[in-house]
Every structure is written in structure tokens, then in C-alpha cells.
Amino acid sequence: MRYRRRLRSRIILSFFLLGFGLTGLFAVATVLVRERLEDQLIGEALVQNLADYAEQFHRDPEGAGGLPFEKIKGIVFSKRRFGNVPFEWQGLPDGVHELTETDARGRVRAYKLAVRKEDDYWFFLSYDIVQERASQRQLTYALVGVVAIFSILSLLIGVWSSKRVISPVTELARRLESLGGRERPEKLAPHFAQDEVGQLAAALDDYAERLTREDMRSAESSSA
């Protein structure tokens, strides 16, 4: 009985690990791909908007004071005002950077910052990504829940499947135990399907038949 339970435990564990592994890999891949694509799209949009903003500023410095976007804010610093640039922005090279800052209320704000530095002007375009990060966290929580649900489902399927798989083996063991002491044991193969267990039962029948014939020969030799 100990060996049957051990085999069944292995089957259950295999189903659980398979379900957990596949859904876990899918969840991780989903989060990573979404984050990478989102960062890439936001970065490309910011770079293009910053170039347009700088071009508009050079055409009309007075009319380029702001951008008509809710989450985007553009700032220009002239050469004589480079010292007024926020300290964390001053050393940033051209490109897109992700930054965080804490406001007066202690709330952390995350944003993307596109930087373009010219000899006479420095252009900055910030994009608030608080909502994007919040949606990423929600997606992560949802995927964790999905992984947990599918892992439990895999475990239940493993329990059910192991019972179906082990049942013929258990039946074969029970019938073997009941054959003890019989002069001509009952055939085992007819009680099982034509699968691996049935093949094993047929092999046991052949072995039992050979033992029976040997016993009969030994008995005849002794009587003679």
C-alpha cells in the first residue's frame, strides 16, 4: 500500500507542478512583455512630442509655453536659467528616463521624462505614469490569482487522474493477493483492459501457468 500511495503522490505532484509552472511562466511573460511594450511606446511618443515641442518653440517661443495634454507637461530652460533646472534633471543625458519624486504630502509620483539639451535651451517633457504603474500592479495581482486558481485546478485534476491511473494497479494487486493457496489460480488478464496493466496481468498469468506445470511435474515425479 505504501508504494501505491507514493506513486499516486508523484502523479498528483507532477500535475500540480505542470499547472503551476505553465501558468507562472505565462504570467511572468505577460507582465514583462506588457511593461516593455508600454515603456517603448511611451518613450517613442515622448521623444517625438519633445522634438515637435522644441521645433514649435524655435518657431514661436511665446506660443510654445504649454501643451494641450492632461498628463504631459513641457518645460524649457534658456541658457541663463540652466541653474534653475531641478537637481535630479541636470545630469540627465538626452533620451527618456523614468523618475520618482515625493510631493509635499508624502505621495510618491512616478513619471517619464524626455530630455533634449541644446546649446542655448534645454527641453523637458514629463509624462505622469502613476495610472500605468497602478494598472500594472492590478494586472500582477490578477495574474497571481489566475496562477493560484489554475494551480489548484491542476492539483484537483491530478488527484482525479491519479485515482483513475492507480485504480487498475490497485485492482491487480488485490486480485494477486486473493490468489494465494489456489491450486490453479484464476486468470487475471480478462479482468483488465488491453493496456500496460493488462499486459502485466497477462505476463503474470503466463508465469503462474509455468509454475503450475512445474509443480505438477514435480508432484508426478515424486509419486513415481
Image (cartoon, rainbow, N blue to C red):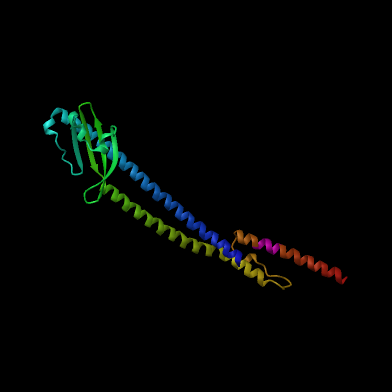
State the residue at coordinates (51%, 62%).
Answer: 161
Please tell me which residue lies in front, 123 or 129: 123
- Report how many numbered discs are placed on residues in the image: 0
Q: Position of residue 43 (x, y in %)?
A: 28, 38
Vertical order, 61 against 215 (above or below): above
Viewed as shown, does residue 168 lie left or right of 92? right
Viewed as shown, does residue 191 lie left or right of 139? right
State the residue at coordinates (64%, 61%).
Answer: 200
The C terminus - image quarter: bottom right
Q: Position of residue 216 (x, y in %)?
A: 80, 68
Q: Position of residue 25 (x, y in %)?
A: 43, 49
Viewed as shown, does residue 45 lie left or right of 164? left
Magenta stretch? Answer: 201-206
State the residue at coordinates (68%, 61%).
Answer: 203
Q: Write down the quadrant of residue 19 in the picture.
A: bottom left
Vertical order, 61 against 147 (above or below): above
Residue 133 among those drawn in magenta: no
Q: Position of residue 32 (x, y in %)?
A: 37, 45
Q: Is residue 45 visible?
A: no
Please tell me which residue lies in front, 147 or 213: 147
State the residue at coordinates (62%, 62%).
Answer: 198
Residue furthest to the front: 83
The N terminus - image quarter: bottom right
Residue furthest to the top: 119
